[in-house]
Image: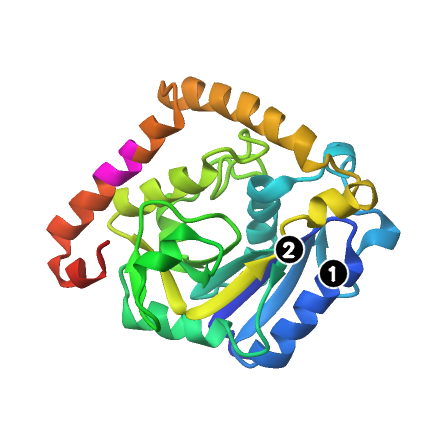
Amino acid sequence: MPMKPCATLVLNRNLPEVTDRLVDHLLKHNGDVTDVYVIESGSTPEGRSRHAGFAAEWPEAIEHGLRFARGFNFGLMEVAKRGTYDQYFLLCQDTIFPDEPTVSVLLEEMQRYPRIGILSPSSADWGEAGLIPDGELRLFWFINLIGWMVRGTFIDCVKNVESASHLDYLFDGTNFRGYDTDIEMVAKAYANDFAAGITKRATFREDKDLTDRLAATMKTEPQHLNRPAMYDEGRRWLRRKYGFNSRWNMVTYAKTFYDQFFQHNPDYLHLRV
């Protein structure tokens, strides 16, 4: 059977009703263009989605979960055992889409702009949305990690092929809570002649207080405990890996590659902000 052009990976941790609602939506509106895989991030047996595809069942994953980086590293490696896709759509379970197709729209944009390696739908809650004309796309050096479509050739360009694991594949899983993971990946894209964009042709919203409402069910920390730990652990990771002492250093690092991209790809200048 021919592969569909996209694999959608949804990260679930003990919220099967929330995840199943998202997956059912994706299958209803986008099932002709994407296969959907649910990655169980250390979920309990009763917390698994009815669409569960791959489950992280080792003790650390069950106790702490995988979070974004480790979860999608694990999921991408498992999906690779099934086959190769042109695009990979990485979604958190708190993503809410309007009642219309999303994946097919993103695929059209990726086909239209072959140098885009990362593409996100737009959220009305983002300041970046004000920089994008209605119905258009713009390139950025920072995009929130909520729903990313990632080009397969970009993944192949940067993934760890020598000692791949959930700790190191596409993302750096040693940065457990993901502080500046988004900027790091965007910088890697531009450094390898791929761009990162947001399109207003597709939209979503984030259920922002989902974790706070259901932290106990998810078996995770509410945000008032997670955020301080994320900042503390993330800043130490940033200093250890890059020698940077602030988020501004990381933003400047990514922006440097962003600027260079347009020197090499002047036909994308109309997408610059």
> Foreground: 130 or 19?
130
**Residue at mark 2 to residue at mark 1: CA–CA distance:** 10 Å
Q: Is residue 220 in view? A: yes
Please state the extent of the stretch shown in magenta in the rendering: 252-256
Q: Is residue 81 in view? A: no
Residue carrying label 1: 18
Which colour assignment does the render follow? rainbow
Residue carrying label 2: 207
Q: Percent position (x, y) of residue 124?
A: 47, 60
Q: Residue at x 83, y 45 (%)?
A: 217
Q: Percent position (x, y) of residue 88?
A: 49, 61
The verdict on residue 254 being magenta is yes
Q: Percent position (x, y) of residue 131?
A: 31, 57
Q: Residue at x 56, y 77 (%)?
A: 30
Total numbered circles:
2
> Foreground: 180 or 36?
180
Q: Percent position (x, y) of residue 149?
A: 45, 60
